[in-house]
C-alpha cells in the first residue's frame, strides 16, 4: 500500500506556497516509494527481511503439515463411511439370520449370537469415537494455526510500520541536505507529476545512495549501457 511521504516543509507545501512558474524556483523530484523499497532496512539481507522470511517459512511449513493431516483425515473419513456401510450390511444379515433361526435355537445360543452382533457394532463404534477425537484435535490445531498466523501478521505489520517510520525520517533528512546543497527550493513527488522534461532533477537515486541503498540491478545495467 502506498503511503503519504513526508518531506518536511521543502515538498508540496512549498510548491503550493510558491509560484512554481517563476524562473527563480529550482524544482527537484523524488519517487518516495522507490527509495523506501530499496532502502537497506528493506533489502533482502536486512534483519527485518530475514525475520519476515523466517516467520513466513514457519507458517508455510505448519500450513503444509496441516494440509497433509487434513488430507489423511479426509481419506480416513471416507474409509470409515465405506466400512460403516459394510458393517451395517453385515449386522443386518446376522440379525435377519438370527430372527430366522431363533425358533430352533436355545436361549443360550441366541444370546451368544446377539453378543457377537453387539461386539461388531461396538468395535466399529470405538473406531468412530477415536476418529472423532482425532478430528477434534485437528480442529484445535487449525484454530491455533489461524490465531498464530493472525498474530504473526499483526506483529510483522507493526514492525514494518516502525521500520518504515525510521526509513522515512532518514530519507527526509538526507533529502533536505541534498536539496539545500544543490539549491532546490521545491521538491515534488514524481509519482504525482503528470509530465516533466527535467529528468536530471530527479533526486531519487542520489537520496537512495545517501541513505546507504544501492540501485536495482536492472536500472544500474540500463544506465551503464547509455
Image (cartoon, rainbow, N blue to C red):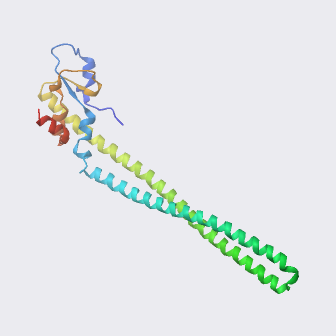
221 to 14, vertically: above or below: below
Taking 103 as reference, is 199 left or right?
left
26 to 150, vertically: above or below: above
Q: Residue at left 83%, top 75%? A: 99
Q: Residue at left 49%, top 63%? A: 69
Q: Picture quarter containing residue 119?
A: bottom right
Query: How many marks on residues?
Result: 0
Observer-nearest of 34 and 92: 92
Observer-nearest of 11 and 53: 53
Q: Residue at left 17%, top 25%? A: 199
Observer-nearest of 112 and 215: 112
Q: Picture quarter containing residue 160?
A: top left
Taking 153 as reference, is 184 left or right?
left
45 to 66, vertically: above or below: above
Name the image quarter holding the C terminus: top left
Q: Residue at left 48%, top 54%? A: 146
Q: Picture quarter containing residue 188?
A: top left
Looking at this view, name the residue that lies furthest to the right.
103
Where is residue 190? Give x, y as percent.
Answer: 25, 27
Where is residue 36? Give x, y as percent.
Answer: 26, 39
188 to 70, vertically: above or below: above
Name the image quarter holding the N terminus: top left
Where is residue 138? Give x, y as percent.
Answer: 53, 62
Where is residue 30? Give x, y as percent.
Answer: 22, 30
Amino acid at each position: 500500500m502506498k503511503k503519504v511521504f513526508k518531506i518536511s516543509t521543502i515538498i508540496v507545501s512549498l510548491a503550493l506556497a510558491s509560484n512554481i512558474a517563476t524562473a527563480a524556483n529550482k524544482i527537484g523530484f523524488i519517487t518516495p516509494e522507490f527509495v523506501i523499497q530499496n532502502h537497506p532496512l528493506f533489502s533482502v539481507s536486512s534483519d527485518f527481511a530475514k525475520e519476515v522470511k523466517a516467520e513466513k517459512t514457519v507458517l508455510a511449513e505448519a500450513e503444509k503439515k496441516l494440509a497433509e493431516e487434513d488430507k489423511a483425515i479426509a481419506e480416513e473419513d471416507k474409509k470409515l463411511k465405506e466400512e460403516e456401510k459394510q458393517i451395517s450390511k453385515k449386522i443386518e444379515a446376522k440379525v435377519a439370520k438370527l430372527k430366522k433361526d431363533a425358533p430352533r435355537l436355545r436361549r443360550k445360543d441366541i444370546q451368544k449370537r446377539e453378543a457377537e452382533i453387539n461386539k461388531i457394532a461396538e468395535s466399529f463404534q470405538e473406531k468412530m469415537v477415536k476418529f472423532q477425537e482425532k478430528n477434534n484435535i485437528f480442529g484445535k490445531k487449525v484454530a491455533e494455526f489461524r490465531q498464530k498466523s493472525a498474530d504473526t501478521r499483526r506483529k510483522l505489520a507493526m514492525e514494518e510500520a516502525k521500520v518504515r517510520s525510521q526509513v522515512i525520517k532518514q530519507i527526509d533528512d538526507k533529502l533536505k541536505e541534498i536539496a539545500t546543497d544543490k539549491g532546490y527550493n521545491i521538491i515534488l513527488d514524481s509519482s504525482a507529476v503528470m509530465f516533466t522534461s527535467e529528468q536530471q532533477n530527479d533526486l531519487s537515486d542520489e537520496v537512495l545512495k545517501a541513505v546507504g541503498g544501492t540501485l536495482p540491478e536492472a536500472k544500474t545495467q540500463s544506465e551503464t549501457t547509455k
